Image: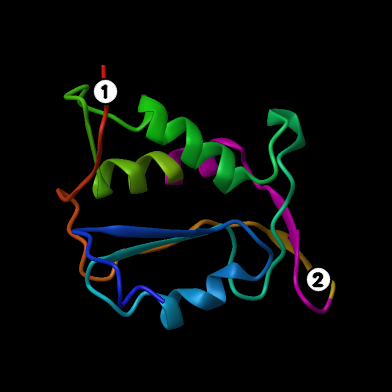
């Protein structure tokens, strides 16, 4: 799917139940960073309190609009985005999820950076 892209870095973000199962299969290219809203055996919750489809979608949008720029240099790196998403998920404290067998658990962000380095630029903000 990504073989034909001529980009320095690509992000695949899946905000769906059981999406973490794609981490190993999709992120095989060293230029791809994968963001998955839940472990491979857990559901993903709707982020109704943010009037958003899912938590990952909402946090990714706010992060790429500037909130993830930790050092305020106008550039969001892979490391800054990763840290921002982890913090936002953690701040929600135990987003409820269920396993395929109906067992109760908590939604957890899955990030697979492959060969993407923490200092690789994801986006330059137009300020």
Indicate which label's residue lies in the foreground, 1 or 2: 1
Q: Image quadrant for the C terminus?
A: top left
Q: Residue at x 78, y 77 (%)?
A: 100
Please provide percent x and percent y for residue 102: 85, 72
Please provide percent x and percent y for residue 9: 24, 58
Rendered image: mark on residue 103: 2
Q: Is residue 101 left or right of residue 75?
A: right
Asked whether 49 or 10 is in front, the reply is 10
- Tell me if residue 121 comes above or below residue 21 in the rendering: above
Please provide percent x and percent y for residue 20: 54, 70
Extreme residue in the right direction: 102
Does dot 1 land on a helix, a strand or a loop? loop
Please provide percent x and percent y for residue 68: 35, 33
| Disc 2 residue crowd, few under 14, some 14–19, many 20+, Cα 10 Å | few
Q: Is residue 101 left or right of residue 15?
A: right
Q: Is residue 113 left or right of residue 65?
A: left
| Disc 1 residue crowd, few under 14, some 14–19, many 20+, Cα 10 Å | few
| Residue position marked by numbered label 1 in the rendering | 126
Q: Image quadrant for the N terminus?
A: bottom left
The image quarter in which residue 12 lies: bottom left
Q: Residue at x 62, y 41 (%)?
A: 93
For marks 1 and 2, the one nearer the N-term is 2
Does dot 2 land on a helix, a strand or a loop? loop
Q: Answer whether residue 71 is magenta in the image.
A: no
Q: Which range of residues does the magenta coloring cover?
A: 86-101
Q: Residue at x 44, y 39 (%)?
A: 87
């Amino acid at each position: 799917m990504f073989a034909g892209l001529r980009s320095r870095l690509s992000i695949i973000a899946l905000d769906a139940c059981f999406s973490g199962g794609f981490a190993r299969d999709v992120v095989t290219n060293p230029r791809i960073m994968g963001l998955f809203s839940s472990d491979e055996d857990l559901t993903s919750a709707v982020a109704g309190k943010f009037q958003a489809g899912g938590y990952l979608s909402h946090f990714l949008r706010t992060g790429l609009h500037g909130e993830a720029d930790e050092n305020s240099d106008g550039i969001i790196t892979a490391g800054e985005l990763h840290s921002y998403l982890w913090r936002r998920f953690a701040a929600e404290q135990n987003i409820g999820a269920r396993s395929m067998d109906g067992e109760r658990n908590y939604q957890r962000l899955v990030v697979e950076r492959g060969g993407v380095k923490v200092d690789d630029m994801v986006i330059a903000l137009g300020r």
